[in-house]
Image (cartoon, grey):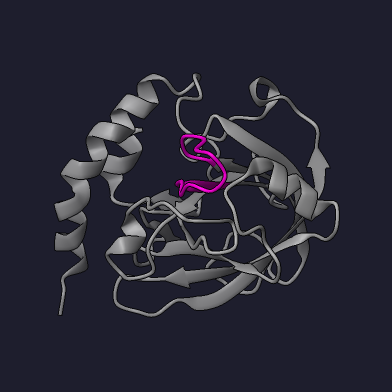
Amino acid sequence: MVDSGRALDTVRSAFVGPFRIAASVRHARVFHPKGLVIGGTVEFNSSWWPGRTRISLPVTARMSGGIGTPSMIPDVLGLALRIDLDEGPTPWDLLLASSGTSSLTRMLPLPATGWNTARYSSLMPLSSTGGPPTWVLAEPVGEHPPTTSINALADALAIAPLVFSLQLATFTNSPTPSGRVVLSDVRDLADDEQPSFDPVVNCPPSIALRPEWLAAAR
């Protein structure tokens, strides 16, 4: 059996440097420069999540490409969620990126060929009320654009909302369904007017980034 703590230590050196570099330029959008801001709702159906379950909560999302490649070329796609919880003074910023689907590859940002094939992960785990390290995952449901084009996202949203299934997974357990995100309201904001998301500052008290060095690196 693979030890989850040892696996996390193995990828530490690969992640801590880039996170520190990104933190030093936090206010300059070096990664994911082009994006689309969309309003919608999120519904949780697991007690792992903060706040109440089985109610619709407002969410502001930013879907983006990692480096803004041409639409037919794979890119690391981003799904940033700002969730307005019904508790606490600040929202919850949750950052997801396209990744692999195994216990190891869900720790890695990996390019996707289109919005329809992207499988999103929090990359590093979170702990809820002191529980085990858990990854937040998201998977497209229904029709999503088959390219990485931001314009294709806007065109798709003009026809129907974009829906995502939320899942939770520990290192040794398979993902379990835990909620749903529905995005429908495109907000016409220039790239330099779009919100910045900070999962360290905007995090509910019951949720902690794991391992602890990740929060320090950011």
Question: At which x and y percent is residue 64?
Answer: 58, 41
Residue at 69% in and 22% down: 193
Question: At which x and y percent is residue 200?
Answer: 46, 38
**Which image quarter holds the C terminus?**
top left
Q: Is residue 27 above or below residue 207?
A: above
Out of 60 and 46, give the one closest to the viewer: 60
Out of 137 and 46, give the one closest to the viewer: 137
131 with respect to 154 (left or right)? left
Q: Is residue 214 above or below residue 40?
A: above
Question: At which x and y percent is residue 28?
Answer: 49, 19
Residue extending furthest front? 72
Image-quadrant location for residue 14: top left
**Residue 21 lies in magenta, yes or no?**
no
Residue at 29% in and 33% down: 18
> What's drawn in magenta, residue-wise?
65-79
Question: At which x and y percent is residue 34?
Answer: 59, 32
126 with respect to 196 (left or right)? left
Mark yes or no: residue 201 visible.
Answer: yes
Out of 80 and 91, give the one closest to the viewer: 80
Mark yes or no: residue 204 visible.
Answer: no
Residue at 46% in and 31% down: 31
**Which image quarter holds the N terminus?**
bottom left
**Which secondary structure dominates the residues rendered in magenta?**
loop
Q: Is residue 176 above or below residue 168?
A: below
Q: Is residue 176 above or below residue 136?
A: below
Q: How many labels, in total?
A: 0
Residue at 49% in and 56% down: 113
